[in-house]
Amino acid sequence: MLPLELDQITFSAGGTTIINGISARIEAGPRTIILGPNGAGKSVLMRLCHGLLEPTGGRVVWHGARNGDVRRHQAMVFQRPVMLRRSALANVVYGLQLAGKSRRESELRAMDVLEVVGLEKQAHRPARVMSGGEQQRLALARAWALGPDVLFLDEPTANLDPASTQDIENIVNAIHASGTKIIMTTHNLGQARRLGDEILFISNGRLMEHSPIDRFFREPASPEASAFIKGELPWHQAGGTG
């Protein structure tokens, strides 16, 4: 699948430019964090990468894709995952069967990933009555079970308490260690330090810098990044959400 190239991509809606001429090349391996204040356009940029949105200008190119069906090799987990009206196990099995796995193979794989994320004892519990942290772990299990080359995570701990956040971060690290490329949005500097290897910092819909995480925090290359690290950049920018 990778590298992923963003070639001068732009996205506008309702007369407002949300993403403005972003170019970047995202390679396999390092965990990529899309960082920026609330309203900078992070979530929209991720949806453009994943293919949920089409850019109004520019191109999104998967250079490693060998056929046109790039969606089969990637997955995405949202801030507020949508749970099917069935058990935790059945939520995972459903996605695997849609991908062409047999019922038996799907159930075995689903139980494996539920165990890894600590939900094996709740496999037969209705997913919609689980806590927010449990649902997010289930959403990660559901995505991980598919064995994606790339996993997009859109602020996966934004609404969680510290204990649940740590659980999610541990799972994200395990998914990365299994060989899946992580591309994740956050506005949390501490989380970016813990989970990132490289930073794409965006502000007001523009890519301000793309650098290794140590360099970003030690020597930010843009005034906007420096202000954000110091807590001086306003949350809401003139652009989109996220």
Image (cartoon, helix red, strand yellow):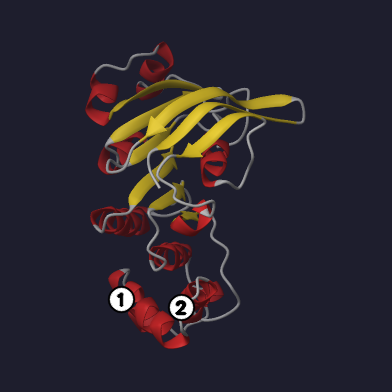
Q: Is residue 222 above or below residue 125?
A: above
Residue 199: x and y, percent?
35, 31
- Work out whether residue 64 or residue 187 is closer to the camera in this orientation and state it: 64
Which residue position is annotated with label 2? 101
Q: Is residue 194 above or below residue 110?
A: above
Can the viewer see residue 119 in this picture?
no
Between label 1 and label 2, give the one nearer the viewer.
2
- Amino acid type, mark 2: Lys
Can the viewer see residue 71 in this picture?
yes
Q: Secondary structure at mark 2?
A: loop
Q: Residue at image x 37%, y 54%?
A: 149
- Relative placement, left or right, of 66 versus 117 is right
Q: Quadrant of the C terminus?
A: top right
Which residue reaches farthest top? 223
Which residue position is annotated with label 1? 115
Residue 52, label in figure: none
- The quadrant in which residue 84 appears is bottom right
- Relative placement, left or right, of 170 versus 225 is left
- Amino acid type, mark 1: Glu
